[in-house]
Amino acid sequence: MVYVGSVDDNVYALNARTGTLLWKYATSGPIIESSPAVAHGVVYVGSVDDNVYALNAGTGALLWKYTTGAGVYSSPAVANGVVYVGSNDNNVYALNASTGALLWKYTTSNWVVSSPAVANGVVYVGSVDRNVYAFGLKGSGAPALPPRPDPQTLSPDLSLPVSRPSAKLPATDD
C-alpha cells in the first residue's frame, strides 16, 4: 500500500502495484502537506487543519486525532510508541502512538515545519528559529545527551580538501 496526503484535504491509500484506490479519509483541513508515517498498522499524518491524525492502515478508520495550536506541515516520526511532530504553533509534540495523548511538548521561538528524525536514541528537529533541537528518547535505553560544546572552543578544520565541480555551468541570458 502507498499512503499520501493531498491538496484536496484527503489521505489516500493506494495499491502499490496497480494504483487502485483502497480507501480515503477526509480531514477537516484545506490541505495536507505532511508525508504520512506508517508504523504497526497505523498511518500518522499532519494536516494544515491543526491536527495530527492516526488512521487504521488497512481501513482508513480514524483511531485518534490530536489538535495543535496551528497547522501541521511537519511529517511525523514514530519511535518506541511515540509520535514526534512539529507544528506552526512553534511546538514539537510527543504523542502516545496508541492513544494520541500528549506526553510532552517543547516550545521553540518559531514554526516547526521540519520533520523530526530519530537516530541512536535521539529525536532531532529543526525550527524556523534557525535552531536544531535534540531530545532523548525516554525509556529507550539510549545514553543521556552529551552537553553542548562551548561555541568559543569550536573552530573549523581548514585542512579538509575542497572539491570543485569540473564542468562549467551553462551561460545565462541575464
Image (spheres, rainbow, N blue to C red):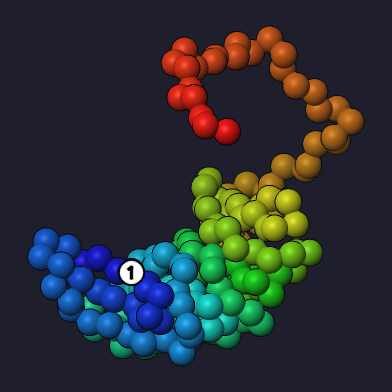
Q: Amino acid at mark 1?
A: Val
Image position, residue 63 (x, y; %) = 39, 86
Q: Is residue 167 left or right of residue 129?
A: left
Residue shown at the point (52%, 32%) measured from the top left = 173
* Residue 111 visible in rendering: yes
Residue 14 locus on image (x, y percent): 20, 71
Quarter of the image with the C terminus is: top right
Position of the N terminus by quadrant: bottom left
Q: In this image, 20 relative to 48: left or right?
A: left
Q: Position of residue 121 (x, y in %)?
A: 55, 51
Front residue of 47/31: it is: 31
Number of residues whose C-alpha sits closer than 10 Å to that of mark 1, classed few (under 14), some (14–19) or many (20 or more): some
The residue that label 1 is drawn on is 4
* Circle 1: element type: strand
Residue at 60% across, 52% down: 124
Q: Nearer the viewer, residue 60 or 142?
A: 60
Task: In this rendered view, identify the residue nearer to me: 62 or 165.
Answer: 165
Q: Quadrant of residue 70?
A: bottom right
Which residue lies at the image location 27% right of the left edge and 82% below the top edge?
Answer: 24
Give the number of callouts.
Answer: 1
Q: Is residue 8 left or right of residue 57?
A: right
From this viewpoint, which residue is outermost toward the right? 152
Looking at the image, is 47 positioned above or below residue 154? Answer: below
